[in-house]
Amino acid sequence: MKDVAAAAGVGLKTVSRVVNGEPGVTDGTAGRVREAIEALGFRRNDSARLLRTGRTASVALLLEDISDPFSSALSRAVERVAAAEDCLLFTGSSGERAERERELALAFCARRVDGLLVVPAGDDHRYLLPEIASGTPVVFLDRPAGAIDADAVLSDNAGGARRGTAHLIAHGHRRIGFVGDLRAIHTAAERERGYRAAMAEAGLPVDERWVDCGPTDRARVGEAVRRLTTGPDAVTALFTANNRVTLAALHHLPADRRPAVVGFDDLELADLLTPGLTVVAQDPAALGALAARRLFARLAGDRSDPARLEVPTTLIARGSGEIRP
Amino acid sequence: MKDVAAAAGVGLKTVSRVVNGEPGVTDGTAGRVREAIEALGFRRNDSARLLRTGRTASVALLLEDISDPFSSALSRAVERVAAAEDCLLFTGSSGERAERERELALAFCARRVDGLLVVPAGDDHRYLLPEIASGTPVVFLDRPAGAIDADAVLSDNAGGARRGTAHLIAHGHRRIGFVGDLRAIHTAAERERGYRAAMAEAGLPVDERWVDCGPTDRARVGEAVRRLTTGPDAVTALFTANNRVTLAALHHLPADRRPAVVGFDDLELADLLTPGLTVVAQDPAALGALAARRLFARLAGDRSDPARLEVPTTLIARGSGEIRP
DNA sequence: CTGAAAGCGCTTACAG
DNA sequence: CTGAAAGCGCTTACAG
């Protein structure tokens, strides 16, 4: 910019005015400046501009894993809101590791992103307290913050699982298995709670051997599914509590004699399976949009108390959940 | 930092040394500085640091649509490489709109990202020439750059489509339909080329009515599929040239009397369909990793000529492509 | 071992 | 209408 000013024979401020389209520059001067800009190939450095301005016109979205369809749908929605606010978006994946989440979150804060959207991997977010205190709004997504009071936008996990389980009960099942994620994960615990609530509401006992929680790798889920669906005590229906569990379970269930299945999370092609897969669908785009709007509301000065917002889930019946015992 | 220096009664440079763990500070001084940092809640502003340093320790990835499984798998791979280089990642979606691609790319450049990874939407990238000239490396992904010579990492689109089509021919088909994306999209044109090459190699004529290219919305693909698979001149097999086309086609084909199908791009659950879906799978993770490594090689000083790198595709036979006429 | 000065590339606040 | 000075929050290059 200095070079442009020198080339055009004007002051720095005049170049700045032309670059920013501010008024108060005669056409002649502006023309000379524009020529110099052209000749020198000048392009304003926004990072420098933003340093002076005090904001960075960027927000960060910290996900569990961007390659997961849930995360990527979330990202797209956040991106849309950010774009409408002329904000650029950083994304990063924690890989479900609390330490990596912290590392990335603090790196984003060190860059002074205007705001932070976090799908938490860890359960203690006190490390963000100084950042929040210094004015960086943080909104949690999909799972609530741990050990701090902060905005969170969540799916109706318990309600969805309750409805999915009740759907199986309504189709005559009394012995229903629940295969879920690690209990330490909030969504997993909530879904289990919904499952138990539905069983209790129907006056059905839950045999603890029907409930299997743990990592979602194929081996463990396969073993759980095998155990639950074989032998004299086999369940007649399965509630699989997230997309990875559902996928793994479907791969392990013999296609010819599959129990009734309701899965949490929708899957592409789910309607083309035989029978179609009945699911409790989340709305990741709504989650992302709502969380992003909340973040920008905070940036716009909203000082109301931290709130927990809930996005509804939808039961989609396609066949697998309507099989009778 | 100024406040910390004042509180600790030292110079700015000493604070800087402590914050960066540089040697040459006595334990006593360092201790006082650390106390001041703690007391004031000081956290270094990396944006400011990077302004002085001349780099931003960030790269940008410009996608067609991050919510697409292909794009998100790509992102994850890029993220991994960037993380290994201590770089943060900006992501953005062009939505297949050339103008938005340009807008986002230039916004990232204005932030002075260290490098840019682009899945092009437009076909003229001369607008990036000044950026490239000023030292920002740009690597194109999935599709080559238009009107400029630049690094590009591409799938073997033609080869994959050729192999997929040859697979159908090997299973006895002579009348094979091709349903593709808009011809203006490089990958679409390449896949059509592969299809025609396989037909030609087998000495089979291509009736131009068998080839249907256009937008990938369900209505258009459905109409194409209906037209191709009905009537006395119906084809006996279909090559669907990307994941959206395949999905739409499967939804429109009567499950009971489906022609043979080979799709380009793998889909989750593809193996659980009846019959399983035979596909030509791309390797988005390999594409992303390779492109990112190329970008960082450029940043590390690699001045070799721009190159076009190719990632192989894999034919996965699962049943739908092995149906005989 | 320590720090004052200059500078990264811009904008803000002000004066002419 | 125009520009010189100061500053955003750091680091670099240097001197003591």
Image: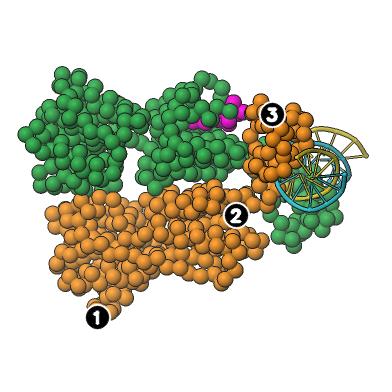
Chain colours: A green, B orange, C yellow, D cyan
The residue pinned by badge 2 equals B114
Q: Left or right of B11: which side holds B120?
A: left
Q: Where in the figure is residue A177, as x and y percent of width and height?
A: 18, 32
Closer mark to the observer between disc 2 and disc 3: 3
Q: Left or right of B21: which side holds A234?
A: left
The residue pinned by badge 3 equals B36
Label 2 close to label 3 by CB (< 8 Å)? no
Above or below, A323 against B305 in this view is: above
The residue pinned by badge 1 equals B203
- Is B207 in front, or is B296? B296
Q: Are marks 2 and 1 on the same chain?
A: yes
Residues in magenta, as a range: A131-139
Q: Which residue is painted at 46% across and 28% down in the image?
A: A124
Give the class, few, some or many, for how many residues have Cα within 10 Å of label 3's Cα (few <14, many ≥20): many
Give the distance between the C-alpha atoms of the residues marked 2 and 1, in whole angstroms: 50 Å
Chain label for disc 3: B
Closer mark to the observer between disc 2 and disc 1: 2
* Labels in figure, total: 3
Q: Which kind of residue does numbered mark 3 sit on?
A: Ala
Q: Which residue is painted at 75% across and 33% down in the image?
A: B5
Secondary structure category for the residue under label 2: loop
Label 1 close to label 3 by CB (< 8 Å)? no
Secondary structure category for the residue under label 1: loop
